[in-house]
Amino acid sequence: MPAPSDFLQFVDQNADAFIQRLAEAVAIPSISCEVPRRPDVVKMAHWLDGQLKALGVETQLRDLGTHVMDGVELGIPPAVLGRIGNDPKKKTVLLYGHFDVQPASKSDGWNTDPFTLTIHPTNGQLIGRGSSDDKGPVLGWLNVLQYHHQNKKELPVNLRMCFEGMEETGSEGLDDLVVKEGAKGGWFDGVDCVCISDNYWLNTRTPALTYGLRGIAYYKVNVSGPTRDLHSGVFGRMVHEPMTDLIQIMSKLVDTTGQILVPGVDDMVSVASEEEKSLYEQLDYSIADVEESVGAPITLSDDKTTVLMGRMRSPSLSLHGIEGAFYGSGGKTVIPANVTGKFSIRLVPPQTPENVNPLVVSYIESEFAKLKTKNKLSVEAMHGGRPWIADHKHWNFEAAKRATEAVYGRSPDLTREGGSIPVTLTFAETLGVNVLLLPMGRGDDGAHSTNEKLDRSNFIEGTKLLGTYLYELAQ
Ligand SMILES: C[C@H](N)C(=O)N[C@@H](Cc1c[nH]cn1)C(=O)O
Ligand SMILES: [Zn+2]
Ligand SMILES: [Zn+2]
């Protein structure tokens, strides 16, 4: 069923108001991985709940208990559940998104305040933390709801919603909620398919449907020795230095070609067949696209297929940072007493945090033993999530393909995403239904990076795409 033409007009006519609502959402710094920002994530849950209620959605805030972060016990922000429509003749679609964001501060290199949505004066880009990941897409659904509510139009499908505030910090507590609400009589009982808009096109021009995600296993490696920081002139070459030991360990995790050095991790993954390789060859992507997104000619290979396979079907290990290390300007001559290295591995089938964690922990312990240092080591597996792959020939994907052709006038790329959305596999397995990822933003949006943006056209045409997809599902 095509979307009503006045829906498309409504979206164009209300574009400025939609952007204003996005500015309100971006202004709440709902950073889930920073202890002092936790009240803002809760504030964001209430803001979203209020918006949904005002658009005629029945909602509930669900308590997800507590967890420990940085040694502090914190309340997990409530999940926002929504429900509208209960017509047995219609399909029931579950929408998922997240209202928490990654950290951001002007000092990281942002050109503007990350929590003030700034409209670029020439290209109209909507710049702000969460504009693309994932407040823009979540608000895309609100825009669709607003058309139906304001014009007293019935939705073409029944909707169930699940919005969380912990996606960027391992989706704590959400799996249990999905299992509980997926049972008979629960909030998600009767769901026919799931749609998640929380990733990005491959490039800056071709819309995409995504049928795979990498999983993640996140680690902390702590090395400690002296009881306090030391003067390097007084103690240098007298004691084992924790930072020296940690750097040795971190340098043995991955090489400069991207190969993971933890024995057994890369070997778990099968070699791609020629048929599979041809899927990547066909995608509208080039080395120039990567260079444009990252702003430098630094790809690991000059071959497009190799680079794409690195992101879509291979595991990767990235070093993220060292807590406790001196990082300020100037030349402080300190020997840090206690340092914690952080890294993560993106996982692909058949890897899971459960089968990779023991390999990582025992390798680090054995490499540390070889250093013959008197410092102390501890390795901690933090949050994790399993990889996911869906059937992209399913009617859910077919509906999204038709919607993309209707809105963008072209067929979408079929992609696997290199990032992770831990709850995706839980939805697929617990509810036993197909899950579709329908991205709104572009490959150069800078999610998790400085100057994150969402192009105005992606927000507006993306809203049309989400609405049109619901009508195509009703066919
Ligand atoms: C793809 C999604 N928008 C996303 O950014 N997911 C995060 C999830 C995560 C895991 N640990 C911290 N955040 C990601 O892939 O990094
Ligand atoms: Zn993210
Ligand atoms: Zn996201």
Image (cartoon, helix red, strand yellow):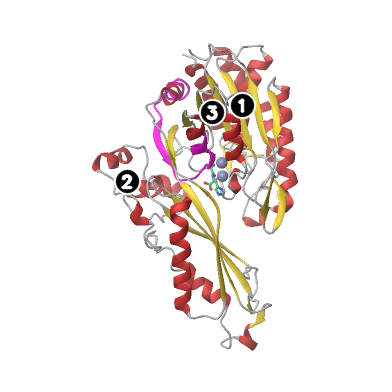
Instruction: Judge left or right: residue 133 versus residue 281.
Output: right
Return the residue nearer the eye: 5 or 208. Answer: 208
Q: Is residue 381 above or below residue 271?
A: below
The numbered disc on residue 267 is: none
Give yes or no for contact between labels 2 and 1 (Cβ–Cβ under 8 Å): no
Task: Identify the residue position indicated by label 3 in the image.
Answer: 462
Residue 405 on the magenta segment:
yes
Residue 439, horizontal then vertical, whole percent: 50, 34
Task: Identify the residue position indicated by label 1 in the image.
Answer: 186
Return the residue nearer the eye: 258 or 261. Answer: 261
Residue 86, horizontal then vertical, whole percent: 61, 15
Q: Amino acid at mark 3?
A: Gly
What SS does tag 1 mark?
loop
Q: Amino acid at mark 2?
A: Thr
Q: Which of marks 3 and 1 precedes in the sequence?
A: 1
Residue bounds of the magenta highlight? 400-427
Task: Identify the residue position indicated by label 2 in the image.
Answer: 305
**Res 451 visible:** no
